[in-house]
Image: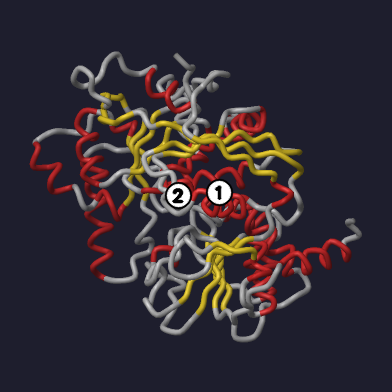
Amino acid sequence: MSGQTLTEKILLRKVNAPVVPDSEYFRIPVDLALGHDATIALLIERFKKTGRRIWDPARCFFAADHFVPPSTPERADILNRFLNFVKEESVPQDLLYRGISHQLLVEDRRCQPGMVICGADSHTVMAGALGCFAAGMGSTDILAILPGGEVILPVPKSILVRLTGKVPPWLFGKDIALEIIRRIGEGGAVAHALEYHDRTEPGLSMDSRFAISNMSVEAGATNGIFVPDEALRSYLARRDAPEGGNGHSADARFEAAWLDPDPDAGYVQEIDIKVEDVPPLVALPGDLSRIVPIDEAESQPIQQVFVGSCAGGRVEDLAIVARLLRNRRVAQGVMLVVTPASQTIYYECLRNGIFQTLAEAGALITNSSCGACGGIDKGLIGAGQSCLSTSNRNFRGRMGSPDGLIYLASPLAAAAAAITGRLTDPRLLLAETRADAGIE
């Protein structure tokens, strides 16, 4: 019998036997249940009809991030219904209006390695960058979790993704995520876990890891998980420092379990990616089945650039955009919309001058929320418009009109498009910027 993958080790340590003999399904205790205004509102009435209460309000990680602030009266009603439910069920209200739920999750002390996290949103998978099992589910699944704190799941087999080589200055997590999807295909990891082993030099940043885990679901994966290492330990040490005030640090229920896959773990597939060989990539409009090097794509005019979402609205993303835009201007006819993923990121960009640089270059900076990514507000596109976005989905109508076009690429490529007004290989502009700064 082979050893266990990281996903198997996290899930199977919490169970004793299948739900029924010889079944592949297990009843698994949930450490955190994530939800937000748009999805929790869908289940409130059905939950009330059960006559039950939430099993442990402290384990509910609920945020208001979609309709904040509401852009229509209908969305205001949805938000208000969610807020009333949070209050009635005594769910902690410390996350309201602070940003995108998935980003808040990885910023919060309650989210730790080894946990089982289920969320009413597919991009809950992002928390897998912290070495935990994190999976997105439908509102009905979360409805079943809330009264009892358990989920019934099969334990997915894993695909090993081994990342090696020296990280070039133009490479970001989005490029690696797109390369993985390009290799295995859109939906190529359905019902599987993607297990990431970072052996790069000097190692991927946590922000890049978040982007990769976030887009695991775009490959169809149940979850995407990074093997815990020293980079994660350093991140958590900073995040969870006593002076940080992130989450419920005194609650012993939210403690880490540092686990590793067994050396003889069995994988259904192994993928090796040498990161210095990955060029800047772009997903062409419509879906994620057409991913190409950006220097091979037709240099289409771009009317909007969106830098934001849970896939591309972190400090690393905004910093590289500001770096390229310093002493430059957004091209005429281009609207650059910047939406930081959380208030923590917002404050950091205020402190370090990123927002000043972006504003001086002509960017429009919004509050922390999902915003344009889900076609909600603050940056929708119209018919015939093209948008280059750092978000995670580009199907028709995702960001507004079904007759608009959405390209997905890294924040570096987004900055290049904002400056030139078209799809552009960002390496030339980055080289110019580095030369001006005296960096070889």
- Depicted 311 relative to depicted 415: above or below: above
Q: Secondary structure at mark 1?
A: helix
Q: Residues within 10 Å of mark 2 (few under 14, many from 20)?
A: many
- Provide residue 180's location: percent of width, then percent of height: 55, 48
In this rendering, the count of numbered labels is: 2
Q: Residue at x 27, y 44 (%)?
A: 86
Question: In which quadrant of the rendered view does residue 54 lie?
Answer: top left
Q: Which mark is residue 219?
A: 2
- Provide residue 97's location: percent of width, then percent of height: 41, 53
Q: Residue at x 54, y 18 (%)?
A: 264
Mark 1 vs 2: CB contact within 8 A:
yes
- Provide residue 130's location: percent of width, then percent of height: 53, 34
Q: Residue at x 13, y 48 (%)?
A: 45
Q: Residue at x 57, y 30 (%)?
A: 227
- Depicted 79 relative to depicted 250: above or below: below
Residue 53 vs residue 195: left or right?
left
Q: CA distance from mark 1 to mark 2?
A: 8 Å
Question: In which quadrant of the rendered view does residue 152 lie?
Answer: top left
Q: Secondary structure at mark 2?
A: helix
Residue 85 vs residue 287: left or right?
left
- Depicted 279 relative to depicted 231: above or below: below
In this view, the residue in front, 196 or 73, is 196
Whether residue 245 appears in this view of the structure is no
Type of amino acid at the residue the image marks with label 2: Ala
In this view, the residue in front, 227 or 400, is 227
In this view, the residue in front, 280 or 10, is 280
Q: Which mark is residue 180?
A: 1
Quadrant where the N terminus is found in the figure: top left
In this view, the residue in front, 228 or 330, is 228
- Provide residue 258's location: percent of width, then percent of height: 53, 21
Whether residue 48 appears in this view of the structure is yes
